[in-house]
Amino acid sequence: LALAKSYVIEGNFGFLPRAKTAGVSICDSATARVAACLYYDYLSWDPDDAALGQGALHRVGLATAMPLAPQLSLGINQKYSSFTLEDNAGVNIAEQSASGYSLDAGLIVRMSQTVNLGVVGYNLITANEAVFERAFGGGLAINASPTLMIAGDVRYDFEKDAARYSGGAEYFV
């Protein structure tokens, strides 16, 4: 967010047979020293396994970032999430539904003109640790050319003692 000066408006929608996602964000890193991004995300699912029930997640947040030095940026993400789980009759399962505020914080180190390294703590402050678990993440992004970025990351969830790995590429037009 703080690495490039730009205005960005994004929208997304994803559809799978048993899940749907949507989101919208508006970001400004051009007019002030502190970059800001306001966003909303939605996820709903209805699994094949009838015993699991169905659920939805709504999240609204404000991400801010600022350079601390030419090669170092700090980011803070404040979000409010509302998670509901229903049984197959559409009745809310209160003990598995939650809502509340949480905060993430991260750093990006610009290793070179083409390589960025990031670390992040998820849900460092949270209203409900049982649902919004603390996690640690790290990532590496390589700008292979002015129009192509290749990235990978890992996220470790302390409560589940499990890691998730992902990667991808982005082509800029």
Image (cartoon, rainbow, N blue to C red):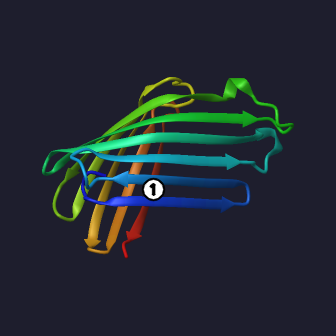
Q: Position of residue 108 (x, y in %)?
A: 25, 48
Q: Quadrant of residue 6?
A: bottom left
> With 24 as the anchor, is 103 left or right in this view?
left
Q: Quadrant of residue 58?
A: top right
| Residue 115 or residue 30, whichever sits in front | 30
Which residue is painted at 46% across and 40% down in the image?
Answer: 61
Residue at the farthest right position:
89
Residue marked by disc 1: 166
- Which residue is depicted at the point 66% across and 55% down? 20
Q: Residue at x 79, y 46 (%)?
A: 49
Q: Quadrant of the C terminus?
A: bottom left
The picture places residue 28, in percent across and down from the top left corner, at 33, 53
Q: Is residue 97 above or below residue 23?
A: above
Q: Crowdedness of circle 1 by 10 Å Cα count: few (<14), some, many (20+)?
A: few
Q: How many marks?
A: 1
Q: Tell me where residue 18 appears, x and y as whole percent.
A: 73, 55
Q: Nearer the viewer, residue 130 or 82?
A: 82
Q: Position of residue 146 (x, y in %)?
A: 26, 74
Q: Is 92 left or right of 124, judged from the image as shown?
A: right
Q: Quadrant of residue 113?
A: bottom left
- Determine whether the residue tagged by mark 1 lies in a helix, strand or loop: strand
- Foreground residue among 6 and 70: 6
Instruction: Answer left or right for 119 relative to 97.
Output: left
Q: Amino acid at mark 1?
A: Ser
Vertical position of residue 22 compared to residue 65: above or below: below
Residue drawn at 61 percent across, 54 percent down: 21
